[in-house]
Amino acid sequence: MEKHQRATIEPLIAPVCLQFHSEEELEGLRTATLLVLENVGVRFPSRPALELLAANGAHVESASQVVRFPPDLVLRAMADVPRHFLLGARNRALDLQLQTGLTFFCNDGCGTLMREADGSSRPSTKADVAASALVCDGLSSVSFLWPMVAAQDCGSTASLHEIEALWTNSAKHVQGFVHGRTAARYAIEMASVIAGSEAERRRRPPLSAMLCTVSPLMQDREAIEAALEFAKAGIPVGFLSMPTLGTTAPATMAGLFAVADAEVISATVLMQLAAPGAAVFHSIIPEACDPRTGNYVAKPLNRSGRQLAIETAHHWGMSSQAGAFGTAASRPGTWQSASEVAIDSYLPALSGAEMAEGIGLTEGSTTLVLESLLLDSDLYHRARYALVRPEISEETLALDTIAAVQPGGHFLSTKHTRRHLPSAMVSGLQHEAGADGKYRDPVAVARERVEWILANHEPEPLDEDKRNELALILASAERGLH
């Protein structure tokens, strides 16, 4: 194989969109969200947020920092949220225009451990962020990038170093986890460098932000203040709620969603008050606990709510980023590692999610094993092909060929077969044969392909001037955030 530097993306394309809940059920959930926001409220531990909400008619309790939202305020603000928007990339050909019928996936993120080739694990570093970004740049299953693991060797500026490592090693859109007002301003400056100007950054934002709420019914100060900076700068912002049934949310899925949706919508309302028309996306990932101990449990058998999260976002008129993948298995290539994620790309696409995340991490999304990226990517493409509607036409029906072959004949030598057989079967990782003619271990194949990508894939280079400007911004951030 030759070295290459052309990154490609292949989103999931669903020929139909299934709705699992009726409009009446979804409207009932929205009504419940409005009641929670009006009667219970959400805590905003941020003075700028509280002042902005109070100035626009929300009921602010200064001592508790709890904000209650009149329904008309919520509905007015939510009317300004764009249904779809553009996520820019370093390479314009890799821009993501969110739209109905396409689902763009990214890798998983927020891991803390890196698994070495000998099986040992160690704390992750910026170099690991860079290596995983290089692999993701070479995978068409990954349309945009998260920092897969934390740059734990970069101290208080880790989140900025992470997005710099992604931009340096991939031409795709970057979604970061930058918290705090000051750090957000540095990230916005970096995004302007990548885009070429502030105006171009607003037209084609190369950065978006994913920020988490705190269940039940709280916002994180550093996250919400970063979000305010991003929204005013035209950087798309997503809010992710991850409540746990029975601990940080009611023990019923509907009750969990009433809490989670209130968290996401309250933050979205704030963004619209700060910057009407700001691009905001909606994300809820329900979690579970062991009823015997209260401990977190990854991937329970009766996991549900993925479709409801997407439908809830769409009922509000927002784009959705769905949760997917992320196995609790400690080793890639096991029954557990595949079974826990096998339908995780198929269902979000069928439910119409514009975006989804989760490819590549193990051990409850804590550990990076690079070959897992290839194994999850293989599962992703199985879903992509499963969603393809076979063409039925005069050419594909092949009636003339069938008539020529006759009963008991053979199709291998026909012109029709020569035209179509090369694309009739796409091999997976488990179809690679060894020197003995037998199929090889897919994990070994995945490991070899990772090694090849790291050695040979050359992402579209970042201009030297831009690299130097990013370095100057990071140096300034090192002084300003320590």
Image: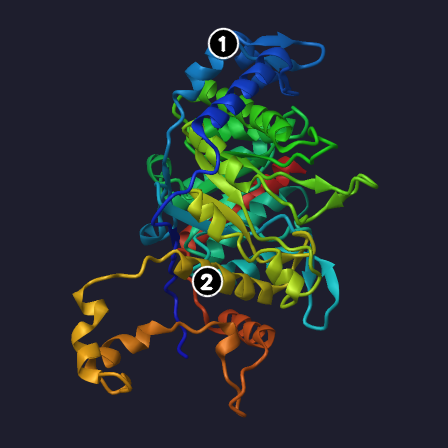
Q: Which residue is mark 1?
A: 56
Quadrant location, the N terminus: bottom left
Residue type at tag 1 = Asn
Quadrant location, the C terminus: top right
Location of residue 35 (image quadrant): top right
Residue 115 place in picture, x, y as percent = 69, 64
Residue type at tag 2 = Arg
Q: Residue at x 66, y 49 (%)?
A: 301
| Vertical position of residue 84 compared to residue 342: above or below | above
Query: Which sits earlier in the primary sequence, circle 2 or circle 1?
Result: 1
The residue tagged with tag 1: helix, strand or loop?
Answer: loop
Point out the residue furthest to the front here.
407
Please state which of residues 154 and 399 is positioned toward the viewer in this rendering.
Answer: 399
Residue 112 place in picture, x, y as percent = 69, 52
Q: Residue 61: tell me if it is visible.
A: yes
Q: Residue 187: tell me if it is visible.
A: no
The residue tagged with tag 2: helix, strand or loop?
Answer: helix
Q: Which residue is mark 2?
A: 382
Location of residue 332 (image quadrant): bottom right
Q: Residue at x 45, y 21 (%)?
A: 272
Spatial separation of the CA atoms under disc 2 and disc 1: 49 Å
